[in-house]
């Protein structure tokens, strides 16, 4: 219907105009468009409208997914920092234990 409406309005605007002089002037040439072509064009435009709606929904899903991914990446960074902290503490405790064991052996001799 959209194509048919624009076709009919452009046809109305392109009629031959008779100016005040009485001479007939030629306007644009009229083109006949089959109804089947108009129906196909209208269906394509409706399909495009639905495709745009689907794309808008997909963009929203991608945005939400990117927010979730950023949150998970932040959690990974926090966990890596905790793991480094625990490794450092483990190494300090292990080194201290070995040092005390060596001091105990030296003191017993």
Image: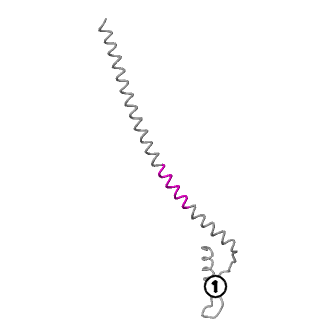
Name the image quarter holding the C terminus.
top left
Name the image quarter holding the N terminus.
bottom right
Residue 88 coordinates in the image, percent (x, y) = 37, 27
In the foreground, 20 or 96: 96
Q: Is residue 88 above or below residue 43?
A: above
What residue is rendered at 62% in x and 79% in y? 8
Q: How is the image coloured?
A: one colour
In the foreground, 49 or 19: 49
Give the main secondary structure of the magenta stretch.
helix
What residue is rendered at 68% in x and 80% in y? 30
Left or right of 64 in this view: 28: right
Give the quarter of the image for residue 79.
top left
Dot 1, crowdedness within 10 Å: few (<14), some or many (≥20)? some
Q: Which residue is mark 1?
A: 15
State yes or no: residue 35 in magenta: no
Give the magenta part as a residue range. 52-65
Residue 6 coordinates in the image, percent (x, y) = 60, 76
């Amino acid at each position: 219907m959209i194509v048919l409406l624009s076709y009919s309005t452009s046809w109305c605007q392109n009629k031959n105009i008779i100016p005040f002089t009485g001479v007939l002037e030629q306007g644009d040439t009229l083109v006949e468009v089959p109804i089947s072509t108009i129906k196909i064009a209208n269906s394509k435009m409706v399909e495009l409208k639905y495709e745009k709606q689907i794309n808008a929904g997909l963009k929203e899903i991608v945005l939400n997914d990117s927010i979730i991914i950023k949150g998970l990446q932040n959690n990974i960074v926090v966990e890596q920092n905790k793991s480094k902290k625990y490794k450092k503490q483990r190494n300090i405790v292990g080194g201290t234990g070995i040092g005390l064991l060596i001091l105990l052996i030296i003191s017993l001799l």
